[in-house]
Amino acid sequence: MSQTVLHNFPSTSRLWREVLRQWIVKNLAPFVFLSAFFLTVVIGNFLFTTDYGRRRLMEVPRYAVIYDFPTIFTPLYWLLLFLPFLLVPPIVVLVRRMLGSSIYRWCSKIPEIRILDYVVITCLALGFVGYSLWQAQAFALYGAGSDAVSSVEIRFQILAGLSFWAMAVLMSILPYLAVYALIRCFRRSGLFWIVAAAVVIIIESIYMILLNMKWPFLLFEATLVLTIFSHSKTYPYVKTSIGAVALFAAYLIISVHVFRLDQPVRDQPVSVAKTAWQRAPEMVFAGLTRMATLYPFYYQIFTEEGSVCGGIREQARVGPSCRPSTYVYTRIFGHDGFEGRGTAPAAVHISGYALGGWPIAIFALVCASIILGLLACLPQGASALIGAFGIMGAVAGYHFSQLPGEGPLFYDHGLVWTLIPMIIYVAWRKFFTPS
């Protein structure tokens, strides 16, 4: 009997892993939102209550001031922090029960992208972004700058030369096309999709790196890892683990490069890999606390001073004179030369709190939860068009954990700029092409 149990244990373990994977994939957008918020904001705030966290923050005077805030670590401070874990799950369940079957029926009618259509669309997108980067002198400017400050200036110079639509194609449409091709690979749709996925991923990665920013590239690579976990037919956990290790290594290396920590010392070359390894503890702490350090400032400023940037109506105007993200940045960093350009954003409900206290915080989180619930209704077995949109929805879930509500929808990486071309293509196939 015991031998039978031991013999069946590996298969039982595999079964439970597959059940867990299917549950995560089914709830991918809300899962990513809650996980990202926990990793980038909640853990850091827990660290700040420890001796280690206090000691590290005290090394940076502009962050150390949080311990003087009268609102720090109060019950309502923690309640606002944990609000997503209280509201998001029940709203997602409710949305799925109400709309899940209707969305499933609609998604079952969505076709695949034809090879010729994919080639034309992708070539146009890659060519447009490549030309825009060339016009912005990104190829010439990349790698310029001898320190972190000049590197950031180079970044702003490159971004200033790119139009919003060039960035939207780079940040929304091309990642979607890469994910689509990768899903078709996993569905064994033919050699073309293997080649297409490889080409688009490589070129898109180069384009992302040319921005001289680490997060767009890392987020794109994380999107590919999510796709592997969600759609790979064999060894998804092994492949995802390898991808996660590669992603962590990329984070260390690209951080060293973007902050120009790889510059020669006394004319002696510096090993990027060695520097990345030596700086790993510092950069891991920075990654866990980068967003977390902003929350105490948001809660202190907008609790004690109210909605200093106005409410939703003021923020809905084009080019408002004050935004919470730029206001908080200036309050933290002062006039460092990047005021008005540098931003210190916060998650959807924290940004809502900045615009109108608890009512707007709850309203913003409920709206985000409804969107996450709609994304959780997308069936994974439908067309790869839907599967890829589900992955991009998970990316939007990440952005909801880092940005105000309009960011995941309407910024250059917004979900709307993926959804609109997708709707246009489906409508074109339905009404203007023979069945």
Image: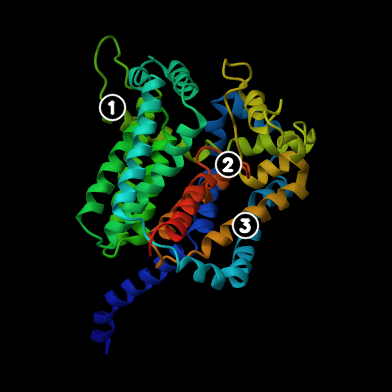
Is 256 placed above or below 215 here? above
Q: Which residue sits at x=40%, y=65%?
A: 21
Which residue position holds label 3? 369
The disc, 1 or 2, on the residue closer to the chain's N-terminal end is: 1
Query: Marks 3/1: CA distance?
Result: 41 Å
Relative height, residue 304 to residue 137 (above, below) = below
Q: Is residue 394 visible?
A: no
Query: At label 2, which amino acid type do we have?
Result: Phe
Image quadrant where one finds the C terminus? bottom left
Label located before the other in sequence (2 or 3)? 3
Q: Residues within 10 Å of mark 1 (few under 14, many from 20)?
A: some
Q: Residue at x 66, y 47 (%)?
A: 349
Q: How is the image coloured?
A: rainbow
Closest to the observer, 205 or 72: 205
Earlier in the chain: of badge 3 and badge 1, it is 1
10 Å crowding of disc 2: few (<14), some (14-19), many (20+):
few
